[in-house]
Image (tube, rainbow, N blue to C red):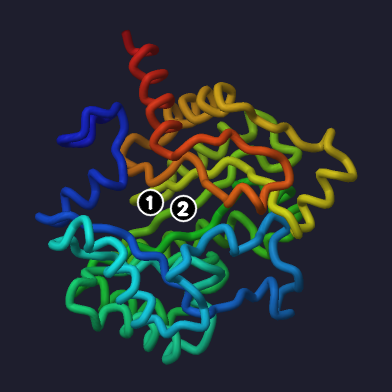
């Protein structure tokens, strides 16, 4: 595995990517721009993906009723107390951030980029919500700003995607990622490890399949069961369908996933942190950096 430049980790991190691109510190600011999702508004379905509750994504400053520019200002105010010279990436995170009329979508991006300290965009979306008209505009934006489009793949197994009511296939994700890459736009992929019905070998197979894609970043999350979701009800009704990973088992899963993953990819995250009050079952009570330290330690031990 690559050491990723100045980073001594045996894989490349998202922080490495930012250090390679920017000569200054850069911080993400999460934005809730009030978008919805075709899997919620009836275009493809209602109720959304079976695991989804977007309350888990947004910090206090990122409320949908606030204008994007206000969220940016409040986010910068929050971080700049400690790092006054920091620059920022506006992270359009909640729901599907390319879903809507292109003019309205681009207006919201423009609000964020209108702040002098915002140097780029991270756009979270679905692979079935990237029209050519919007790709045209993003291609132009990418020539002037840092831009990364993060596609929710979640699984490379179509049976799983149907089961979780995702509303698209893996083949659609592949096609859209290649279309985006061909425009010179960085692409990220989001995967959930531990979805019901997926064995350890199926999960590791995701690493093999996505390694063939022209991706810049990978974001991994462990499955979390969130109150009020269909999946949480399914867990209560039939917990035998779910394998609940403990910390050490999930560390081993991530380590083996990395060993099979394209070493050129930058790892954005291994775990997610839903608020404890939203969880159906207690989680690990561990900060992201603490989990990463365990992964790194396990990798270093294995290389001795």
> Within 10 Å of the Cα at label 2, are there few (<14), some (14-19), or many (20+) other Cα atoms?
many
Q: Residue 215 carries which label?
A: 1
In the picture provided, is 236 more to the left or to the right than 290? right
Q: In which quarter of the image is the N terminus?
A: top left
The residue lying toward the viewer, choosing from 267 and 179, is 267
Q: Quadrant of the C terminus?
A: top left
In the picture provided, is 114 more to the left or to the right than 233? left
Look at the image and tell me whether residue 180 can be seen: no
Callout 1 touching callout 2 (CB < 8 Å) = yes
Q: Position of residue 211 (x, y in %)?
A: 43, 41
Q: Quadrant of residue 162?
A: bottom right
Kindly identify the residue that appears in the image at 74 percent across and 41 percent down.
196
Say how many tags the image has. Answer: 2
Task: State the SS at label 1.
Answer: loop
Which residue is situated farthest in the front direction here? 81
Q: Position of residue 232 (x, y in %)?
A: 77, 50
N-term mark: 1 or 2: 2
Q: How far apart are marks 1 and 2 (CA)?
A: 7 Å
Kindly identify the residue that appears in the image at 42 percent across and 32 percent down.
290
> Which of labels 1 and 2 is toward the front?
2
The residue lying toward the viewer, choosing from 234 and 42, is 234
Kindly identify the residue that appears in the image at 73 percent across and 57 percent down.
50
Look at the image and tell me whether residue 117 can be seen: yes
In the picture provided, is 280 more to the left or to the right than 300? right
Q: Where is residue 53 in the image (x, y as percent from the top left)?
A: 65, 61
Residue on which disc 2 sits: 189
């Amino acid at each position: 595995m690559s050491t990723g430049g100045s980073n001594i980790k045996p894989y490349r991190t998202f922080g490495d990517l930012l250090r390679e691109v920017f000569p200054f510190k850069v911080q993400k600011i999460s934005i809730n721009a009030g978008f919805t999702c075709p899997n919620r508004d009836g275009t493809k379905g209602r109720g959304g993906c079976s695991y989804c509750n977007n309350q888990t994504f947004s910090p206090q400053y990122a409320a949908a009723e606030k204008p994007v520019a206000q969220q940016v200002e409040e986010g910068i105010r929050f971080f700049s107390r400690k790092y006054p010279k920091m620059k920022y990436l506006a992270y359009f995170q909640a729901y599907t951030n390319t879903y809507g009329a292109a003019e309205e979508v681009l207006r919201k991006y423009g609000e964020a980029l209108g702040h002098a300290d915002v140097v780029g965009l991270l756009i979270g979306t679905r692979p079935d919500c990237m029209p050519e008209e919007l790709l045209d505009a993003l291609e132009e934006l990418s020539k002037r700003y840092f831009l990364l489009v993060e596609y929710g793949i979640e699984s490379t197994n179509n049976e799983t995607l149907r089961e979780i009511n995702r509303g698209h296939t893996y083949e659609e994700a592949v096609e859209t990622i290649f279309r985006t890459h061909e425009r010179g736009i960085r692409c990220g992929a989001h995967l959930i490890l531990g979805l019901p019905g997926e064995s350890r070998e199926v999960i590791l197979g995701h690493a093999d399949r996505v390694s063939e894609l022209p991706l810049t970043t990978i974001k991994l999350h462990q499955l979390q069961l969130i109150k009020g979701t269909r999946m949480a009800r399914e867990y209560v009704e039939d917990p035998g369908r779910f394998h609940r990973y403990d910390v050490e088992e999930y560390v081993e899963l991530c380590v083996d996933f990395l060993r099979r993953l394209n070493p050129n990819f930058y790892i954005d995250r291994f775990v997610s942190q839903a608020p404890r009050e939203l969880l159906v079952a207690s989680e690990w009570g561990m900060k992201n950096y603490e989990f990463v330290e365990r992964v790194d330690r396990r990798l270093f031990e294995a290389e001795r």
